[in-house]
C-alpha cells in the first residue's frame, strides 16, 4: 500500500523539470521519468489556467507580486525560486497536507516560511526519514541527495554565469551595431 496516492506539482515546477530534457544531459532522465509518471497518472500538475478560477487566479497573482515576482503565475521569463512560492500558494489554496521543498526560503527563518507559517514543509531528509526502511538506507540516500544537490547547484550557477556572458556579448554587439549605423 502506498502512503500517498499522487504527487502534485505546480505548473511552474513542471516547466523547470521539463527544461532539463533540453538543457541538461545529466538530468534529462528526470524530465523523461516525470513525463511518464504524468502520463501514467501518478503525477498531477496544477495548471493555473485550467484548475484555478479566474478570481482566485487574480488573488494568487497579486500575492506573487507582493512577494516581488513580476510575471504573476507565468514563468516567462523565469524567476528564481518562483516554483517554490507558486507551490506554496497552490498547497495553501487547495489545502494540501504539506509541501516538499529543500529551498532555503522555506526553511526556518526564510521568506517562504515567514509568508506561509502554517504550511508544513518537508525537505529531502524528512522524506527519507519517512520512507527509508533501515538506518543504512537513510545514510546512503542522504549521501546521494547531498551530492546531487551540490552538483545541481554548481550546474545552475554555471548556467547563470554563461547566460550573463551571453547577455553581455549581446549588449556589446547591439552597441557596436548602433555605432556603425
Image: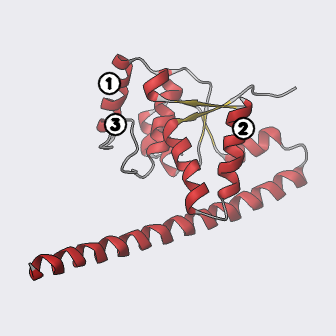
What is the quadrant of the C terminus in the image? bottom left
Residue that badge 1 annotates: 58
**Which residue is painted at 68% across and 62% down in the image?**
148
> Which mark is in front, 1 or 2?
2
Q: Position of residue 38 (x, y in %)?
A: 67, 35
Q: Secondary structure at mark 2?
A: helix
State the image coordinates of residue 125 (x, y, percent, origin top left).
Answer: 71, 48
Task: Decide which of 42, 103 is in the foreground and name it.
Answer: 42
Residue visible at 32% across and 24% down in the picture: 58
Q: Which residue is mark 3?
A: 72
Does residue 22 sit above or below 17 in this rendering?
below
Q: Nearer the viewer, residue 95 or 32?
A: 32
- Who's the residue at 77% across and 45% down the image? 128
Query: Where, by quadrant of the figure, is residue 130 drawn?
Result: top right
Disc 1, SS: helix
Q: Is residue 150 left or right of residue 108?
A: right
Residue 82 vertical placement versus 177 (above, below): above
Q: Nearer the viewer, mark 2 or mark 3?
A: 2
As drawn, is 87 to the left or to the right of 143? left
Q: Earlier in the sequence, mark 1 or mark 2?
A: 2
Label 2 vs 3, first from the N-terminus: 2
Q: Residue at x 70, y 34 (%)?
A: 39
Q: Which residue is mark 2?
A: 37
Percent position of residue 51, x then y: 49, 21
For the residue carrying disc 3, how many other residues have a C-alpha within 10 Å: few (<14), some (14-19), or many (20+)? many
Within 10 angstroms of label 2, few (less than 14), some, or many (20 or more) residues?
Answer: some
Q: Looking at the image, do the residues carrying marks 3 and 1 touch, with CB atoms under 8 Å apart?
A: no
Q: Position of residue 32 (x, y in %)?
A: 69, 49
Whether residues under marks 2 and 3 lie with C-beta atoms below 8 angstroms apart, the answer is no
Amino acid at each position: 500500500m502506498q502512503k500517498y496516492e499522487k504527487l502534485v506539482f505546480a505548473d511552474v515546477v513542471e516547466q523547470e523539470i521539463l527544461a532539463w530534457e533540453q538543457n541538461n544531459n545529466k538530468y534529462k532522465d528526470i524530465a523523461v521519468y516525470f513525463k511518464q509518471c504524468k502520463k501514467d497518472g501518478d503525477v498531477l500538475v496544477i495548471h493555473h489556467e485550467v484548475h484555478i478560477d479566474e478570481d482566485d487566479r487574480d488573488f494568487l497573482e497579486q500575492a506573487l507580486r507582493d512577494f516581488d515576482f513580476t510575471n504573476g503565475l507565468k514563468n516567462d521569463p523565469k524567476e528564481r525560486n518562483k516554483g517554490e512560492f507558486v507551490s506554496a500558494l497552490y498547497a495553501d489554496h487547495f489545502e494540501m497536507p504539506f509541501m516538499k521543498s529543500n529551498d532555503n526560503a522555506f526553511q526556518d527563518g526564510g521568506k517562504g516560511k515567514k509568508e506561509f507559517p502554517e504550511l508544513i514543509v518537508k525537505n529531502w531528509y524528512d522524506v527519507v526519514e519517512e520512507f527509508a526502511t533501515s538506518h543504512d538506507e537513510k545514510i546512503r540516500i542522504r549521501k546521494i541527495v547531498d551530492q546531487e544537490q551540490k552538483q545541481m547547484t554548481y550546474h545552475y550557477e554555471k548556467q547563470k554565469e554563461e547566460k550573463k556572458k551571453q547577455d553581455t556579448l549581446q549588449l556589446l554587439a547591439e552597441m557596436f551595431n548602433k555605432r556603425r549605423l
